[in-house]
Amino acid sequence: MKTHVHPHQRNRSEPFPSDNFWLWLLDGIVMVAGVLGPLCTLPQVVIIYGSHHAAGVSVLTWGLYAILDVPWILYGLAHRQKPILYSYLLWCTFNSLVAIGAILYS
């Protein structure tokens, strides 16, 4: 009979980045995507703060994006998952900047 292994009890002996080429490649892709994804929000931030104009930008949407990033940040901290932690710290920062800009310049 196979028993279920809870994610917290799994073997964490796999090094980061992995010695396996395909896992190493995936580790690298995830790290790049984790930084580039949030940076895609940078043009919105520049437009809002550069023009002092945020018409049509939803404070509710961007604020909720920022709030919903917090559980992921906590998850990354709790599980010591650097890609998740760094990515969602960036997402939360940029989402917050857009929400604050929408409040200031609407």
Image: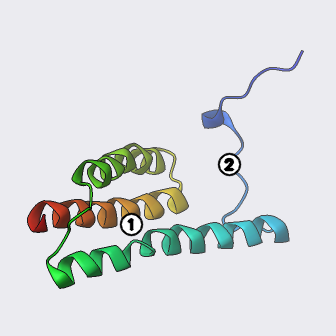
The answer to whether 39 is drawn above or below residue 16 in the figure is below
Q: Closer to the N terminus: mark 1 or mark 2? A: 2
The answer to whether 31 is drawn above or below residue 1 in the figure is below
Q: Secondary structure at mark 2?
A: loop
Packing grade of label 1 (10 A; few <14, some 14-19, many >=20) is many
For this rendering, which residue is in front, 41 or 4?
Answer: 41
Picture quadrant of residue 32? bottom right
The answer to whether 14 is drawn above or below residue 67 in the figure is below
Residue 77 in picture, x, y percent from top left: 43, 50
Q: How is the image coloured?
A: rainbow
- Most extreme residue toward the right is 1
Residue displayed at 18% across by 63% down: 102
Residue bearing the label numbered 2: 12
Packing grade of label 2 (10 A; few <14, some 14-19, many >=20) is few
Question: Which quadrant is home to the N terminus?
Answer: top right
Residue 94 in picture, x, y percent from top left: 32, 67
Residue type marked 1: Leu
For this rendering, which residue is in front, 74 or 38?
Answer: 38
- Most extreme residue toward the bottom is 50
Residue type marked 2: Arg
* Horizontal side of residue 14 vs 43, given as left or right: right
Residue displayed at 73% across by 66% down: 26
3D distance between C-alphas at marks 1 and 2: 26 Å
Query: Which mark is drawn over residue 69?
Result: none
Q: Secondary structure at mark 1?
A: helix
Residue 17 visible in rendering: yes
Residue bearing the label numbered 1: 90
Residue 20 visible in rendering: no
Question: Which quadrant is home to the C terminus?
Answer: bottom left
